[in-house]
Image (tube, rainbow, N blue to C red):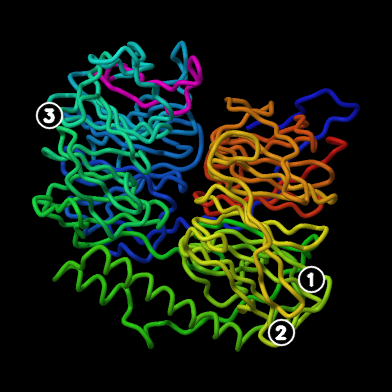
């Protein structure tokens, strides 16, 4: 990680890491154990099957590997821990079993290397025997997917920056000696090569052809080991285009399984390129590993903190309706223990939070008195008669939702804060607003799933029905249903309860499609929402009678002045100028209070110390400066209001108290304190901006 200045100044401004809100929950039962549902995983990305048919999983944000038996009924062992030494990891991402030796290859993403593990003595005596990548002439920059064929490895080097920003595939021998790189896929029937941009998952078919989930282009490529394209007969090209996301691919018999290629589904293609249908009932699926059991697939859902074994007959696919696999069993709890975050997305507040914690809640009685326990009904029914994936997901969410309602009301009846907090965070996966006390106590009734954005709104005049006018309202956006909801703090219950809502999913001017960031105009208190799915900004106003009305919308899809491609967040300076994160145009645009374009800054590029961005995600105003979260560069960049770089903080990884980031989302600034929720690490990083630099 680095921290420092970008332009010479009289004093060196600095953005420095100070603390983390939330913590990892890494405890496991005594191993081996058949208990698969009362311990936590943290964004598990990769998986593989070894020579003994055991199933290996990367518990990525916990920096460890978990090893299960062949039928996924027992957790046998764990291995790893955070660090840079051999046998330690910083974001273990993908796994590959050597087809002949008792070796597992691990792509150790943030350490920019591949590790070789030897399990010949058993999974309780794993030895790390080698690593490679940093020793290459051009070292690995972000190793992701990995495959093996005829003594050679192919590695997707996701964050490598080649000519014009292109990524690469790296070919090396089985012991890690570099052979060559592939920068483009050359098609036999075209003079235009296909560029690699942020390739992630890789897979091989029986002929040894490489399939590449080419994330930056949202397509799937196929080539040989020299980079020559292998044409799909159905498309006439070496590419399948038009995917919603392209993060992984799995060759399974004659099928290609593409998780995320269709929204919350696994698209299924024939290896000739023909789409056959989709598997439904998932939430952001990632990697797929065929099990030793017939018609069973191990599927990772990192954002749920869950890995599941599913049974499916792909011969039943239909092109026009999804096929729902049946859940055999899952591993990983609901990530709802006290103090535990699950997909934290935003913060909102007023002033610097007090250092004195509020009282811890009394333990809530178990929900088993009201509901069949998940480890009972769900596990037993899944073993006897597997549930369809959609029903399992719905049942799990319903059980967790009702348990949260029970815990929330019990807490309201048994404890009250000792003082009013002034900063709240949005724990989206647990559908709660939380205090930022040490226990991250719940501070709201359960929200609707999909609530991601949040901002505080302080009315200058009392609103009708506002029970406690000396406290703010919280404004939230729901990415799934398009609703914008205002919450007020109930004076007796001391919890956030609904006050008003507006919007809804749709394309009318007053509706939203995938809304994200929210900001309040400091001049007239209008509420502005980044309507990312419709590539526009919506301006709303609430009257003293509590009526919410649409004032205007501005923007449309495009890359010209005043146009957007997925605006994700926005903020204001005290003069009412609005700064919009134009994410897929890799820039920040500026508008006045009349929504008229005033200027822009930023351009695409790999950089931590310049006004170059790759998928900027969020923006906040503090002390006459702007702070931009630059996703691909994994950097927080401090700039002047004109876009001149001042200083930055950069750190990619998953150390629990390291200040590192993986998937930062909607940042928030209070005074000189900057809060960065990371929805993959499930932590909130806290940084301090000091214009004078270090003492």
Instruction: Decide whether residue 170 is among the magenta residues.
Output: yes
Instruction: Estimate how packed mark 3 is, as few (under 14), some (14 to 19) or many (20 or more) residues with alpha carbons within 10 Å.
Output: few
- Residue 51's spot in the image, x, y percent? 16, 37
Q: Nearer the viewer, residue 162 or 309?
A: 162
State yes or no: discs 3 and 2 in contact (Cβ < 8 Å).
Answer: no
* Element carrying mark 2: loop
Q: CA distance from mark 3 to mark 1?
A: 64 Å
Q: Is residue 427 visible?
A: no
Mark number displayed over residue 445: none
Q: Are there few (<14), some (14-19), or many (20+) residues within 10 Å of tag 2?
A: few
Q: Quadrant of the C terminus?
A: top right
| Marked residue nearer the N-terminal end (2 or 1) | 1
Q: Label 2 belongs to which residue? A: 465
- Sequence-wise, the earlier of marks 3 and 1 is 3
Q: Percent position (x, y) of residue 498?
A: 61, 78
- Categorize mark 1 by other alpha carbons within 10 Å: few (<14), some (14-19), many (20+): some
Location of mark 3 (residue)? 206
610 vs 505, nearest the viewer: 505
Between disc 3 and disc 2, the foreground one is: 2
Which element carries disc 3, helix, strand or loop? Answer: loop
Rounded to the nearest angstrom, the CA distance separating label 2 from label 1 is: 12 Å
Q: Give x and y (percent) for residue 47.
A: 29, 43
Query: Which region of the structure is painted magenta?
Result: 152-174
Q: Position of residue 116 (x, y in %)?
A: 33, 29
Disc 1 target residue: 459
Residue 479 against residue 499 in the figure, above or below:
above
- Whichever of labels 3 and 2 marks the residue nearer the N terminus, that label is 3
Q: Are marks 2 and 1 in contact (CB under 8 Å)?
A: no
């Amino acid at each position: 990680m680095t921290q420092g200045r970008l332009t010479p100044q009289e004093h060196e401004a600095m953005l420095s890491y100070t603390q983390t809100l939330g913590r990892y929950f890494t405890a496991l039962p005594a191993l081996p154990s058949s208990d698969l549902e009362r311990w936590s995983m943290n964004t598990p990305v990769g998986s593989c099957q070894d020579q003994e048919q055991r199933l290996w999983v990367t518990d990525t944000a916990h920096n460890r590997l978990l090893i299960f038996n062949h039928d996924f009924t027992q957790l046998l062992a764990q291995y790893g821990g955070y660090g840079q030494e051999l046998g330690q990891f910083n974001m273990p991402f993908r796994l590959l079993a050597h087809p002949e030796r008792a070796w597992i290859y691990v792509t150790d993403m943030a350490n920019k290397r591949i590790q070789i593990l030897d399990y010949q003595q058993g999974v309780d005596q794993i030895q790390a025997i080698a690593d490679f990548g940093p020793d290459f002439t051009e070292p690995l920059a972000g190793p992701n997917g990995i495959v093996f064929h005829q003594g050679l490895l192919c590695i997707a080097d996701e964050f490598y920056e080649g000519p014009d920003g292109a990524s690469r595939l790296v070919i090396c021998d089985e012991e890690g000696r570099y052979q060559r790189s592939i920068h483009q896929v050359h098609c036999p029937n075209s003079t235009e090569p296909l560029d690699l941009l942020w390739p992630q998952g890789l897979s091989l078919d029986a002929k040894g052809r490489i399939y590449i989930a080419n994330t930056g282009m949202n397509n799937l490529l196929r080539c040989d080991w020299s980079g020559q394209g292998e044409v799909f007969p159905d498309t006439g090209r070496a590419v399948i285009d038009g995917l919603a996301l392209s993060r992984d691919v799995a060759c399974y018999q004659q099928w290609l399984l593409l998780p995320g290629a269709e929204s919350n589904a696994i698209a299924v293609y024939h290896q000739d390129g023909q789409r056959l249908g989709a598997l439904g009932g998932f939430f952001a699926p990632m990697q797929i590993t065929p099990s030793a059991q017939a018609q069973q697939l191990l599927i990772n859902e990192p954002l749920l903190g869950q890995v599941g074994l599913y049974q499916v007959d792909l011969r039943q696919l239909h092109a026009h309706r999804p096929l729902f696999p049946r859940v055999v069993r899952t591993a990983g709890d609901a990530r709802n223990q006290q103090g535990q975050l699950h997909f934290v997305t935003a913060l909102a507040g007023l002033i610097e939070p007090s250092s004195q914690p509020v009282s811890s809640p009394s333990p809530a009685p178990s929900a088993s008195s009201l509901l069949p326990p998940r480890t009972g009904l769900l596990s037993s029914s899944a073993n006897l008669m597997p549930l369809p994936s959609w029903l399992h997901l719905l049942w799990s969410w319903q059980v967790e939702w009702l348990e949260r309602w029970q815990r929330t009301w019990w807490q309201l009846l048994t404890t009250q804060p000792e003082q009013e907090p002034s900063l709240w965070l949005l724990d989206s996966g647990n559908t709660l607003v939380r205090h930022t006390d040490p226990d991250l106590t719940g501070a709201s009734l359960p929200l609707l799933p999909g609530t991601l954005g949040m901002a505080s709104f302080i009315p200058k005049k009392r609103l009708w029905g506002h029970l406690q006018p000396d406290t703010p309202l919280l404004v939230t956006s729901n990415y799934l249903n398009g609703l914008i909801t205002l919450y007020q703090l109930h004076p007796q219950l001391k919890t956030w309860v609904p006050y008003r809502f507006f919007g809804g999913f749709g394309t009318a001017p007053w509706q939203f499609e995938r809304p994200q960031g929210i900001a309040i105009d400091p001049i007239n208190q209008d509420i502005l929402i980044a309507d990312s799915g419709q590539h526009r900004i919506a301006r709303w106003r609430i009257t003293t009678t509590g009526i919410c009305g649409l004032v205007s919308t501005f923007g449309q899809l495009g890359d010209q002045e005043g146009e957007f491609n997925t605006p994700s967040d926005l903020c204001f300076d005290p003069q009412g100028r609005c700064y919009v994160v134009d994410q897929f145009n890799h820039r920040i645009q500026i508008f006045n209070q009349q929504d008229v374009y005033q200027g822009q800054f930023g351009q695409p590029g790999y950089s931590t110390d310049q006004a170059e961005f790759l998928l900027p995600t969020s923006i906040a105003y503090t002390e006459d400066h702007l702070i931009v979260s630059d996703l691909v560069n994994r950097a927080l960049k401090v700039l002047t209001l004109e876009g001149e770089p001042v200083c930055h903080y950069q750190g990619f990884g998953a150390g629990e108290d390291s200040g590192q980031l993986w998937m930062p989302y909607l940042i928030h600034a209070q005074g000189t304190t900057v809060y960065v929720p990371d929805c993959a690490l499930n932590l909130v990083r806290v940084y301090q901006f000091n214009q004078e630099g270090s003492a």
